[in-house]
Structure formats: structure tokens, C-alpha cells
Amino acid sequence: MEYRQYRIEGCDDARVTRQLYALLTAHSKAFSLIYFQYDRNEKYSRKTQKIKEKLEQYEISSREMKKWPGTETLDERSIYRMVTYRIDEDSLWDIMDVFDMTKTIWDWDYPKYPMDICFYREDGLAWFYITAHEKLNTLILDGSLGVSELDIESTGVKLIPEEAYAERYYLR
């Protein structure tokens, strides 16, 4: 299968972000967030706690990690917990409520929110992920989703093809 990789520009607009979220959720089976703490005694922000509580019934998995799509940390002291949530008919309204708490994809960052949202296809491939603190994102297409470059750009973003391909991440 031939993968095409892009960086998305134009994610600084709240309206565009809403349209992008709608497209991503429509073509994904799951998404993940990274819950960060400097130590186990640190409390999450009010918004992060609210998100965690609203989504907990849709949780697929939760584990501490040092590497996730788009990021690898050398920080051995802090806690990075990746929590993955299912996207289906039952969860969709609550997920969109959570997404509406942010203005743009770049809001997915500590301390206000969980970090680095990532979307997974049916086969488990991480097909869109961000590294919010660096304002980096990656989109991977291959035709199997039934989503074209034009579909993505119809949300108001611009796709920039990337020559160097990132490591492929799969939901486990």
C-alpha cells in the first residue's frame, strides 16, 4: 500500500478545526490523548479532569508511555499516560462536546488540556496526530479510508506533502 504523508496548515481557526474534527471522527475508530503530570501528586486542571470524566466510559486502554505518535520523551521523572477512546455512535456526542472545549487542535497541550490528540483508522494506523507544543502535525493517507486530499482540504486546511516519512504507529 502506498502511503502519502502531509502536514496540515490552517489549523489556527476554530471553525476549520471543528470541520476537521468532524471529518477525522467520521473516518476513525478511536482517538488518544496524553495525560501529563510532573508527579503522581499533581492534580489535573479543571478542564482536563472534566474531559477525563466525560470520556471515561469510552476508554479502550490506558498506559504510561515515553513514546507516542509524533513524540518521544527522555523525561524519566514525569508521567505520560496515553488513554485511548473508542469512536462510535454511542460516544460521538460526548466526544464532540469534549472537542468543543478547545478552539484549535493546538489547545491539546499541558497544563490546560490533555496533550497531543491522535486519530486511528479501523486497521489501527495513527492517521492524524499532533505534537501541540511544537505545532507539528502529521496526516497519513493511502486511499483505503475513502478520504481524499480534496476531502481534507474542503475543511479549510491546506495539505503540504512531506518527503521524509515518519514512523508508522498502530493502536495496540
Image (tube, grey):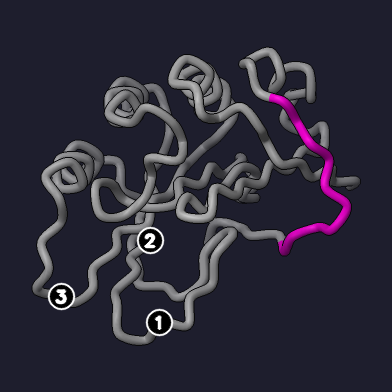
Q: Is residue 37 left or right of residue 150?
A: left
Q: Which residue has dot 2 on it? A: 82
Give the prevailing secondary structure in the magenta stretch.
loop
Task: Check if mark 1's residue and mark 3's residue have beta carbons within 8 Å.
Answer: no
Amino acid at pointer 1 = Asp
Q: From which residue to which does the magenta span run?
A: 158-167
Vertical comparison of 81 with 95: above or below: below
Q: Which residue has dot 3 on it? A: 40
Q: Nearer the viewer, mark 2 or mark 1?
A: 1
Q: Is residue 171 left or right of residue 100?
A: right
Amino acid at pointer 2 = Met
Of callouts 3 and 2, the N-terminal one? 3
Amino acid at pointer 3 = Arg
Q: Is residue 70 left or right of residue 112?
A: right
Q: Is disc 2 surrounded by few (<14), some (14 to 19) or many (20+) residues within 10 Å?
A: many
Q: Is disc 3 surrounded by few (<14), some (14 to 19) or many (20+) residues within 10 Å?
A: few
Q: Which residue has dot 1 on it? A: 75
Q: Is disc 1 surrounded by few (<14), some (14 to 19) or many (20+) residues within 10 Å?
A: few
Say which quarter of the image contains residue 90: top left
Q: Position of residue 56 (x, y in %)?
A: 22, 45
Of callouts 1 and 3, the N-terminal one? 3
| Residue found at x 53% / y 55% | 134
Q: Nearer the viewer, mark 1 or mark 3?
A: 1
Q: Residue furthest bottom?
A: 76
Q: Position of residue 165 (x, y in %)?
A: 81, 57
